[in-house]
Amino acid sequence: MTYGFETLAIHAGQKPEPRTGAVVPPIFQTSTYAQDGVGAPREGYEYSRSGNPTRDALQQCLAALEGGHTALAFASGLAAEDTLLRTVCQPGDHVVIPDDAYGGTYRLFARVAQRWGVSWTAAKVSDVDAVRAAIEPGRTKLVWLETPTNPLLGIADIAALAAVAHDAQARLVVDNTFASPYLQQPLALGADIVVHSTTKYVGGHSDVVGGALVTADAELGAELAYHQNAMGAINGPFDAWLTLRGVKTLGVRMDRHCDNAERVAEFLTRHKAVAQVLYPGLPDHPGHETAAKQMRRFGGMVSFRATGGEAHAVEICNRTKVFVLAESLGGVESLIEHPGRMTHASAAGSPLEVPADLVRLSVGIETVDDLLADLAQALA
Ligand SMILES: *Cc1c(COP(=O)(O)O)cnc(C)c1O
């Protein structure tokens, strides 16, 4: 029997604990496990870097939600990305990355991986031909996508780019952080690996940092699991538990994020202090049709450009009262930030530099009228 998304979010990997019947998976806050004899660990548990029941519960849940075979949880999204990179690439290899990737992803490739001999090309992932042209046949191991992108909310066609990557014997990686598995299922569209910063929508409460990799390929899953243990960038049991607690409500939270973001985007399009609204749910967004094809709804992230340039954008960020001025996204509370000076400062002067008049909103699940009133006073 196959279950729906919300049922999986609440039950996958989360059977009542066998000894006591505890309905919620306990926090197994232990580094090691008593063995029944030399070389006879119980159910394979010998050391918590290698395996921990709380982390396993989260991993099984995430695999079910993305429709994957294997999910692996990490200490952060970047720890997951680093583990993936070092599992799949070696010196001399090449990767294609989005020209408006998350700033930390760009930094990982440009400042860390490059020193280990992995080169990269930034391409506009909303343009299939540009990605095809950026591939170096024989050398390109990964084509890396975000969709929607951060912070410009560009949309990449996952199915089309999976075909382009596979033609060149490369794997397609989709950072699904912005959409969450509720809104978008990249593996079903042909992606080989899904990356998450579970810090964002999956955890959803801004109280824990974490990351995950999910794949439908059992062999690749085993290689990644080997490296998860060999490199050791795991999350702790309490962090896994918090993330699993958050994920139970992912579906209902995402629907409210989308409801509120649609209202905010529509409000901003009518405001004279706003030069442009970037939201894939708007019919005039260049990626609207592709987004409608591959996403259930359009998500909770809205970016916009202020008419008065950088100073104006910064002033708006400083003036909101309900929207908290902070980096990160995907929590229940609304956040506002200036990508050029905050999340994307590390991309200044690179192909990934963002417009100085850009403001990014992570629209939370508060009462929507309060969000609109707050933006109205900040823009006035
Ligand atoms: C935050 C984020 C990351 C990095 O995740 P951390 O948990 O902060 O390490 C990667 N990709 C996207 C799209 C993000 O928003």
Image (cartoon, rainbow, N blue to C red):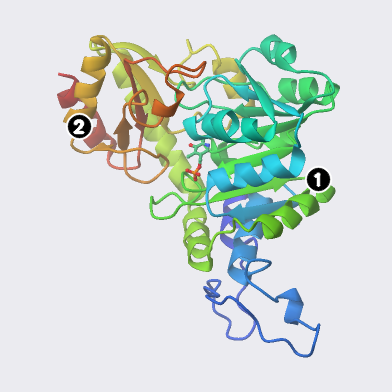
- For the residues labelled 1 and 2, the Cα–Cα distance comes to 45 Å
Which quadrant does the N terminus fall into?
A: bottom right
> What percent of the width, then of the height, locates residue 311?
22, 16
| Residue located 81% across and 45% down the image | 217
Callouts 1 and 2 close, C-beta under 8 Å: no
| Residue located 32% across and 44% down the image | 333
Question: Does the numbered disc 2 mark a residue whose Cβ is under 8 Å from ligand 1?
Answer: no
Q: Secondary structure at mark 2?
A: loop
Along the horizontal axis of the image, is 205 left or right of 298? left
Along the horizontal axis of the image, is 334 left or right of 181? left
Q: Secondary structure at mark 1?
A: loop
Q: Is residue 344 visible?
A: no
> What percent of the width, then of the height, locates residue 350?
49, 18
Along the horizontal axis of the image, is 88 left or right of 21? right
| Residue located 66% across and 74% down the image | 47
What residue does disc 2 label?
320
Label 1 crowding class (10 Å Cα cut-off): few <14, some 14-19, many 20+? some
Nearer the observer, 285 or 172: 172
In terms of image quadrants, where is residue 234?
Answer: bottom right
What is the three-letter code of the residue carrying label 1?
Answer: Asp
What residue does disc 1 label?
217
Label 2 crowding class (10 Å Cα cut-off): few <14, some 14-19, many 20+? many
Report the disc number at residue 90: none
Q: Is residue 365 visible?
A: yes
Q: Residue furthest bottom?
A: 37
| Residue located 63% across and 58% down the image | 232
Residue 205 lies, with reference to residue 39, above or below; the image says above
Nearer the observer, 283 or 201: 201
> What percent of the width, then of the height, locates residue 194?
66, 40
> What percent of the width, then of the height, locates residue 304?
35, 18
Question: Does the numbered disc 1 mark a residue whose Cβ is under 8 Å from ligand 1?
Answer: no
What is the three-letter code of the residue carrying label 2?
Answer: Thr
